[in-house]
Amino acid sequence: MKLTPSKAIILCAASLMLLVFISGWNVIGGELEDRVQQPIALVSDKEDIAEPYTISWTMHQNIAVPEDAEMIAYIEELFHVDLDIWNLENKHYEELLDLELAQERIPDLFRIRQSHDLLKYEMQGVLADIPEDVLREHAPNIVQRIEDFDPRYLEYGKINDALYGIPVINQTNVYRIPIIYREDWLQQLGLDVPETLDEFETVMYSFASDDPDGNGRKDTYGLSKEGLNVVFGAFGQAVFTEQLYFNKKDNELIIGALEPEMKEALAYLQKWYRDGIIDPEFITGENKGGYKHLSHAFINGRIGMTSKGNYYHWIEDGDYSVINEHDEEVPIKATFNVYELQQKNPAANVVIGPPVIGPYGHSGSQAYNMLMSFVAIGANAVSEPGKLEKILEILDYVSANTDPVEQIKMLHGLPGKHWSWSTEFAGEYHILPPFNRMDNYTNKIGSSIGMAVPSQLSERREKWAATLRLDQHGIYNRLEVATPSLIQYTPELIRMRDKAYISIITGDQPVDYFDTFVVEFMEAGGKQVLHEANEWYKRHTIE
């Protein structure tokens, strides 16, 4: 994607004329508003002649971005740069990134998918310190969005008072993971959606014992691994998680998996497993490959409830309306898990239930933190004068553009080709064919290369999620970043946690083994992890 100096001059001149013409108009909801806006990305004459920066850039990808992707070319022209998009598939992002780092290749725009990894990469020496005044000057819109949401989040990106990570805040994480039941099974058995742990137990036993699918065989179970967190949630904790989940108790952080109430929860689960209520394959999980948020155990009719995937993975036909390619309001179609379920069994349907209330009044289901990840700058980027500033300017433009048209363009592509404003519904837009039927089309055209920033939750999908009260009773990890001991001990502590819990549930160990596990966990680094977690919590509490 390199331009010769002569071609660059011609292209930038043409771009300048086009932007000067466009900047006098602002299109909002199909109406034209006379306005003059100075394009922030116009290059100077000096930059126009100078050799462009080559910037290696990582982003969220499900498929590879083509070298000739049109939106990448658009940004390259606009900013007089060469973007080298690293095709690191999201499903294997960390492994692929680590391979690059092992070869001493550090991306200039460094996506840190797991927030807990910021400290790890800083300790490896692969991140640049981002001067806060430089960030504010060259990415003012990102900073404004973060500070309007909560200014303390910027502190999360600091290590020893130096800023290494720009926080990526996902406001849709206000919606916790849903609790899903086979509604047709409940109706077949004459059962209601459970609201308490006792009612939940009754439903699970019936799903496993009373032939809910009507095939005359005893081949169904109540729940599998993801459903276990619903039981733990009835005691106020989340356990089977990718990270250690910390909760608050008596104004201090605790590790949920160590709480005494978990012993009681495990007693329930051990009995259920012994009685054949829990899928004996729960140890390997509900997903059997492919898209990681699919519950194949649920889709294949093996279990009757799950808590796998996010709310948008469980949309049924008609849950809310969307605008189609003809600018018509039409019912939404089933997505992901529901779609796959109904492909196998057209008569199947689902219902989203509340977190069940446990014996001490607790209820909840796992939720992901608002601090989703970080964007950082690679250590080598600062060796070229002006490159850090250029990267931040591009990041600001593609992530938090103040012009509505340009912001949608950065997310979804070109107006009139990839998307169009609705003429019937002010302020809304729809994706045009064939892109509205194309998987991962934004990767194919090279759009959506920026970071998520806080904004109003005004999309129809999120409004639907709110009607289900998914913004209530979420169990969040109160420790949103890593500490040195957490990096050191987490792999072994998670291994110990999972081994102990599984061995108790399956009956390989008695329930009283929980007390031994807690002691061994603390001796294996848990004590130091808790100490550092509470030191961090005292400095960075966000309530």
Image (tube, rainbow, N blue to C red):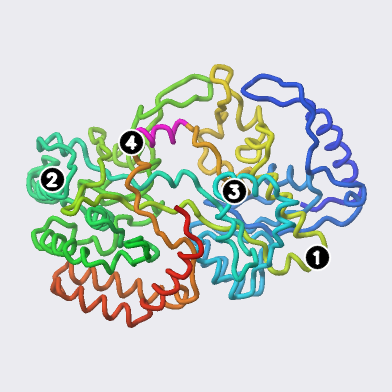
Query: At 31% from the left edge and 77% from the top edge, which residue is drawn?
Result: 521
**Residue 261, percent across and down?**
21, 63
Classify mark 1: residues with Cα within 10 Å, few (<14), some (14-19) or many (20+). few
**The quadrant where residue 77 appears:** top right
Residue linked to disc 3: 146
Task: Tell me how far mark 4 sits from mark 2, CA to CA.
Answer: 20 Å
Span shown in magenta:
460-468
The mark that comes first in sequence, 4 or 3, is 3
Residue 249 lies left or right of residue 504; in this view the side is right
Residue linked to disc 2: 199
Q: Which mark is residue 468?
A: 4
Task: Tell me how far mark 4 sits from mark 1, CA to CA.
Answer: 51 Å
- Magenta highlight on residue 258: no
**Residue 480, percent across and down?**
47, 61
Classify mark 4: residues with Cα within 10 Å, few (<14), some (14-19) or many (20+). some
- Mark 4 or mark 1, whichever is nearer to me: 4
The mark that comes first in sequence, 4 or 1, is 1
Asked if the residues shown at circle 1 and circle 2 are in contact, with their CB atoms under 8 angstroms apart, the answer is no
Task: Tell me how far mark 2 sits from mark 3, CA to CA.
Answer: 42 Å
- Mark 4 or mark 3, whichever is nearer to me: 3
- Mark 2 or mark 3, whichever is nearer to me: 3
Residue 440 lies left or right of residue 532; in this view the side is right
The mark that comes first in sequence, 4 or 2, is 2
